[in-house]
Image: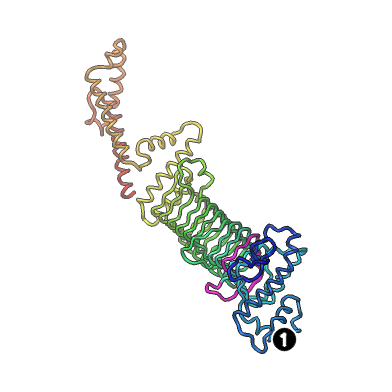
Amino acid sequence: MSCLCEVQNCNFDTFKQSSMCVLHMQKKNLNSKELNCVAEDFDNKLVSYVIDYLDKREEKTVQSLNDNDLRSYLLENTEVHSFTQIRINDRLRHAITFDHISFPKIDSFTGFNFVEILNKIKKIHFNYCFFECNYFKLEESQTFYQDCTFLNWWNVGKADILANENSVLFQDCEFQEDVSISKQSPLEFSLFNNCKFLKTLELSNQLINSSPFNNTDKVNLKCSKLKIENCRFSAKFLFNNTKFDEVIIKDSIFEEKFEFKENFVDKFEIINSNFKKLFDAYKTKFINFRSFKSIYDDFVGFEKCQFGISEKNSEEKVGSVSSFTYTTFMSFTNFRNTKFNSGLDFKNTNLKEPPNFLNTELDTKFTNRETFRVIKDSFDKIGNHIEANRFFVGEMQKYREELKLKKGWSQEKVIFHLNYLVSDFGSSYVRPIMWILLTLYVFDLLVIGYEKNLLYKVVPIYNQEIAAVTGFLNSIASYALPFKKFLLPGMELISLVFYIIIISLVWQAVNALKRHTKR
């Protein structure tokens, strides 16, 4: 006794041991022999599905094909001239929705003929269907894929879309393997709305006249890898609110706005590409970012972006330094309120206008000195000296690290080291004040020791020699006329040295205070 397919509204019998009919049953695990058994029954049931669908949804006119003629036309590959085109068009004038059907992989030895059947249907809506095949050559049909699942790699060939709310070819579909779009006529319509890509989505060697993505705002999506190579976009590129494992843009030109907002990307690379209009990556998080030999002609916005990882256990951050190598910015660039958790490399970047780094947080460990200088100069050029001073300190710290790598000692090394110890290159006014207090304390101890003749008590046998040397040095120090009235009798040399030290520390404190207001 036969049983009906368990899929709702399906009146076909189950296929062998399956709980579903031959149209709805999954075919992914069938071998070649089993697929051959399925093929003929699948094609017959598909034609019956079409006829039943049309019978339920439309009234036949006098000039319409009857069911037998329609079956003959669809299934037996009857030539079009056997029936008048008017009769065919009249019977197939409405779109046909294929619901929850599983389309098997097409091989030459399996005997499936359903692609030829579908090609004779002018308007097709695939709804919650499963595709184990890799490509549908339906160039004469208008098609629309909604909530479908593609189990194997899929090649988006030449197609015409069936009218739908979002004017896309694929809506809310899931692609479990690679998807490729390449080497076809210019793309004149949007392809995807709210689709998920579990492997690679590749656009290559393509002229694109309409945005490939027409996603709904604020819908979170998933795309494992997006690769764009040798493409030219003459329409806006919009891809937002998506989690990517990897994005690679290579040898491509974007003539209109590039919008890439509120995404999360593990690895993002732009190589030898041009962006003619606005580039907007607002609030996007990049773990690894690299822009190489690329040109941005218009405004570039990285506001509130995060680059790199924020963990503090740290050697891994070296590999994720955000770099703009041989990158040219022809207009204004905005990095306001942006975090570079793993450092920034602007060493080989060309800037026509000073970028905006206001309220930027920058990891100093993995940022080079030239980058600090570029950011400092950008603030100086617009008169924001307070922010410039913050990056001036970073520049000096990096220069000190460079000096450490040089062998031996030099006057420059000593000065930089002392500058760091005393005030951290002018960034701390507390440190020189603490040094002043410590210096005064030491000087007070020396004065007490002098008054109690402690030096003479420690080494009494050398008292005459000590007296002769100190007397000679004090007499020399007493000739420093500008400081003479400040020198303590009997301690002229020590007073002079400490006076100079204190003056230097006071200058460092004043300079640090000024740098917190204006340099």
Q: Residue at x 40, y 55 (%)?
A: 337
The x and y percentages for residue 58 are 60, 82
Return the residue found at the far top: 461
Type of the residue with mark 1: Thr
Q: Which residue is mark 1?
A: 84
Residue 249 falls left or right of residue 32: left
**Foreground: 438 or 99?**
99
Q: Say whether residue 150 is magenta.
A: yes
Q: Quadrant of the N terminus?
A: bottom right
Q: Is residue 331 placed above or below 77 in the rendered structure?
A: above
In the rendered image, the residue lying farthest to the right is 109
Q: Tag 1's secondary structure?
A: loop
Quarter where residue 425 is shown: top left
Please give the range of residues in magenta: 145-167
Relative vertical location of residue 197 with respect to residue 494 in this rendering, above or below: below
Q: Is residue 15 magenta?
A: no
